Image (spheres, rainbow, N blue to C red):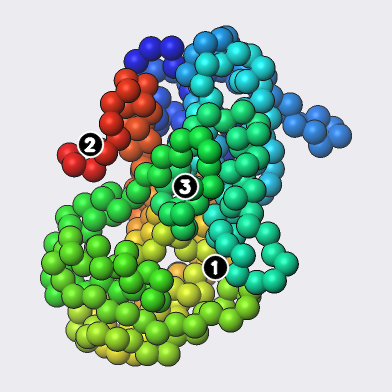
Amino acid sequence: MKDIKIFACKTAENFTQEICDYLKIEPGKINSIKFKNDNNFVQLLETVREKDVYIVQTTLPPVNERIMELLITIDAAKRASAKNINVVLPYFPYSRSDKKDQPRVPITAKLMAEILEAAGATRVITCDLHNPAIQAYFNVNCDRLTAEYLLEEYFKQKNLDNMVIVATDAGSSKKAYKYSEYFKCPIALVDKRREGNDDKAIASTIIGDVKDKNAIIFDDEIDTAGSMMETVKVLKQFGAKNIYAGCTHPVLSGPAIERIKNSDIKELVVTNTIPLTEEKKIDKLTVLSIAPLFAETIKRINEQRPLGELYEM
């Protein structure tokens, strides 16, 4: 690897260190502070002229603070004559605001893409977008990685028998079908309706057989876990033996942790796209690191090698 610098925004230091350990390089030196007037200040402490710069940022709350810090860091790299500015966003902020599904509402995911480009980003690397179509919001390259294979490998090693993959609603049935193909097991679909913007989902029945089976729910993210709890409730009602869940992005806001802790979920498996605070690290939660996948992606981009091979290994 040559002419590469990887910088961590404040909450992405651990994730960035994992990436750099995999690549056997040191993270770039950066100074990020906040003045007393609440303004952010960022300074890159080493030269990036004509370098391939990678800026890693997470979306640990407050999310808007993370976005502003990222934009300022991009601008610092641009004004320091970086050759390329690659933004690494393991979890893409505002990805759930991906369409105009109500009158007079924004498409904030599209706005995020425009802001990143306007700041100077020449490439974005992210993972498991809430809607894959968000990739098309960019006029620069946007690489969309997936935790699918990481989660599959983990559950494969558990050697669960009599499995069924559960789709939490019609929208997630395509993803559930892909998992069921991998595990060569049946699929079940929960009939769920969501009302308004209050994150409340109501599940009423299930299509498919889950009785006495090890049920696994896969999703791209878990926010308040309200939808997940409705699914778990229906699965228990219809006689599921053990219930597992896997997701890429552990947003886990509001009452999520308490809900999971007190639920019939045996194990929730997530990745580290979003750092977990100490109070969220409960016994039922297993965290897999996806940093090596991002590291290998960075390596292949730097060496001008195809990324598709990552999923053929």
- In this picture, residue 91 sits left or right of residue 71: left
- Which callout, 2 or 3, points to the residue nearer the camera? 3
Marks 2/3: CA–CA distance: 20 Å
Instruction: Kindly identify which numbered label has been placed on residue 135.
Output: 3
Q: Secondary structure at mark 3?
A: helix
Give residue 269's quadrant in the image: bottom left
Q: Secondary structure at mark 1?
A: loop
Label pair 1/2, CB-CB below 8 angstroms: no
- Which of the marked residues, 1 or 2, is nearer the chain's N terminus? 1
Q: Which residue is mark 2?
A: 309
Q: Is residue 14 above or below residue 233?
A: above
Which sits in the foreground, 80 or 59? Answer: 80
User: What residue do we see at 42% from left, 90% from top?
Assistant: 204
Dot 3, how many residues are within 10 Å of its Cα: few (below 14), some (14-19), or many (20+)? some
- Which of the marked residues, 2 or 3, is nearer the chain's N terminus? 3
User: What residue do we see at 38% from left, 12% from top?
Assistant: 2
Q: Is residue 132 above or below residue 73?
A: below
Q: Is residue 32 above or below residue 293?
A: above
Dot 1, how many residues are within 10 Å of its Cα: few (below 14), some (14-19), or many (20+)? many
- Residue 113 on image: x %, y %: 58, 43
- In this picture, residue 297 sits left or right of residue 46: left
Instruction: Kindly identify which numbered label has been placed on residue 298.
Output: none
Marks 1/3: CA–CA distance: 25 Å
Instruction: Kindly identify which numbered label has been placed on residue 224.
Output: 1
User: What residue do we see at 44% from left, 16% from top?
Assistant: 4
Kind of residue at disc 1: Thr
Q: Secondary structure at mark 2?
A: helix
- Which of the marked residues, 1 or 3, is nearer the chain's N terminus? 3
Marks 1/2: CA–CA distance: 35 Å
